[in-house]
Image (cartoon, helix red, strand yellow):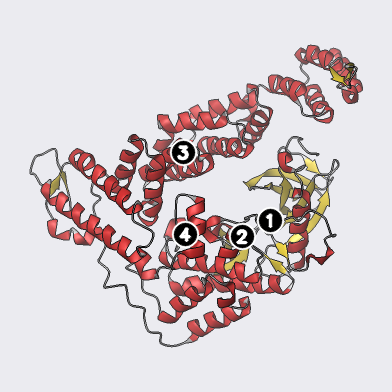
Amino acid sequence: MSSGSKPPQVGDVLDGRYRITGVLGTGGMGCVYRAEHVAIRRPLALKLLHPEVEGMEGISERFQREAFAIGRVDHPNCVNVSDFGELEGGALYMVLEVLDGVPLFDLLEKEHCLGWRRSLHIVRHVLSALAYAHEAGIVHRDVKPENVILVEQDGDRDFAKILDFGIAKLFDDAHVEAGSPGLTQLGVTIGTPTYIAPEQAFGQPVDARADLYALSIMLFEMIAGAPPFDAAEVVTLLTMHATAEVPRISEVAPRISVPQEVEAMIRRGLEKKKEDRFSSANEYIAQIDASLTRDSLSPALTSGGAAPDLPERLSWVEGVRIKAEDVRRTLAPVVARAVTEVQAIPKRRSRKEILGIGAGVTALLAVLLVAFGSSSPDYLPTRTHLPLVAPKHGPEAEAAAEMLEQGQPKEAAAYLRSQRTKVRKEPYAQLVLGHAHASAQRNLEALDAYRRAISLEQSLSKDKLLRTNVGLMLGKKEPRVIDAALDLLGTLVRDAGDKDAEEQLVQLASSDDNLHTRQRAMAVADEVGVGDQIDRLNAYQLDLKQGDSCSDRRDAVAKLRALGDKRAIPALRQAQHRTRTEGLLKRKTNANACLRTDAEEAIQYLKSL
């Protein structure tokens, strides 16, 4: 497989040894396939570069560096690499162990926060892997919950392994020839904005302490349920890493108390200057061990005696009845204005002041709640811990929907992100978040939110705006967006038996004009068990016309022959005579020279049937 060629399909055998059996996930550089060794039938994961990025300058070198980096980290808390090679045409692949576990990101989505003891236990595993990597001269540079998976090992259900050294940087870069283009140059930001160190955010040189900063962000989030810094715009978020004061955990999560020593340890890991952080992962581990083994630790005080959550504040209005439509119509604009005011607060104000304003908004909501009391039969009875409006339609979702209706998609998304711990399990809130991201052209984020919404409430897959937005995304020219949209359709078919999604997926696989969309849709359809409905004759004839290279088109010839359908003969004859214009003299040559013999043999074979 070479640059621009099609991705492998289920059933393909790569390098004569690895059979593709499915897709595990897609990242910025490549796709990870589920595979098996053809001889010993051992399951494994195979990572392959995206065809569209294979030819980009430095990408292949970075991929090789990833394999080299992971190969040097032979540690129980790090994913194992068993092979690395190059396919015919120059495409690089890497073979990794298949991990049967739970991504930390998914665990946080489910449980929100993990408790400080459990969080330290998990982070200690990650630090152990980082310590080994750092000693081998490697900085991970993308430590985040998505890259940590928890497996059960030796009775430990939270045995953590760190994944994806895709942007790993080696300390010992001396082997890179002088004058060669650097894979990561000064002034280029690489990493995930939420977890990026200040020096990394602005493209400055990084070392192992950048990983320790990212890990501290992750640890803060595991305990508090939200990261210390969050913003809708990437530039704002990067600036916060560099300049904003680190909030206390009690400011982000008033109900959570942690020992003062644990809080101090995290804050040390989040120092702006790398010289002020832990000097090594081993030093960080020693501090964690001291915290976990000490018999008594003084609990950290919450800031100013933080107020309880809204349901407890409203417990004194037990029995009051509220009309849902009145609450939606009246409270949503109030919350929207309050959010706008909070966003407009000058940056010189502290986070504590901002949280104080938020508490004021909460109190105002309580007053309005009482103001709408009534005994009319069409009013909803309320009690402590009951949502302010209809189930699954909390006030946060309604407020965001109001912002969206007012043409403020970015503000709606920012507001829902600020309420992350409250809306994680609200399907309607996730649906609104998807609509907001889609309106703001953040397609991958939109699809991710839609996926969460549907996983919480399958009926939301019928939402007309969701379907419209997914259809529009499938018309984009961005392969990653197309792949994510098709994966969502596949999920609807497999998990919900959605006939509309099934029909759309089959249609895309059979006749979509975009080569990448059509072939990816076919792979997804095969994975979810509806591949038998695809019009493969039409699809392969389109492949024969649109294949990026003569070699790709020759593959289409082989598939048409295998179908055994004589209706393919005209297309095969036409392909034999396809020409292209070359040179200043506009000379015409055969564009399909490499497949003429194959096409003729296919024609004769089909005639003989």
Viewer-nearest of discs 4 and 1: 1
Label 2 secondary element: loop
Given the image, on which type of amino acid does mark 3 rest? Ala
Disc 4 versus disc 2: distance between alpha carbons? 18 Å
Disc 2 versus disc 1: distance between alpha carbons? 8 Å
Disc nearer the start of the sequence (3/1): 1
Given the image, on which type of amino acid does mark 2 rest? Asp
Q: Mark 2 highlights which residue? A: 142
Viewer-nearest of discs 3 and 1: 3
Quarter of the image for residue 463 reads top left
Quadrant of the drawing holding the C terminus: top right
Determine whether, in the image, residue 19 is placed left or right of residue 397: right
Q: Which mark is residue 440?
A: 3
Q: Which mark is residue 321?
A: none
Disc 3 versus disc 2: distance between alpha carbons? 26 Å
Q: Are marks 2 and 1 in contact (CB under 8 Å)?
A: yes
Quarter of the image for residue 213 reads bottom right
Q: Answer above or below: position of 572 versus 403.
A: above
Q: Mark 4 highlights which residue? A: 108
Residue at the location (27% across, 69% down)? 306
Q: Nearer the viewer, residue 584 or 544?
A: 584
Viewer-nearest of discs 3 and 4: 3
Residue 216: horizontal and vertical position, in percent?
Answer: 52, 69
In this view, the residue farthest toward the left is 375
Q: Are marks 3 and 2 in contact (CB under 8 Å)?
A: no
Label 3 secondary element: loop
Disc 4 versus disc 1: distance between alpha carbons? 23 Å
Residue 569: horizontal and vertical position, in percent?
Answer: 80, 13
Disc nearer the start of the sequence (4/1): 4
Disc 3 versus disc 1: distance between alpha carbons? 28 Å
Disc nearer the start of the sequence (4/2): 4
Residue 153 in view, yes or no: no
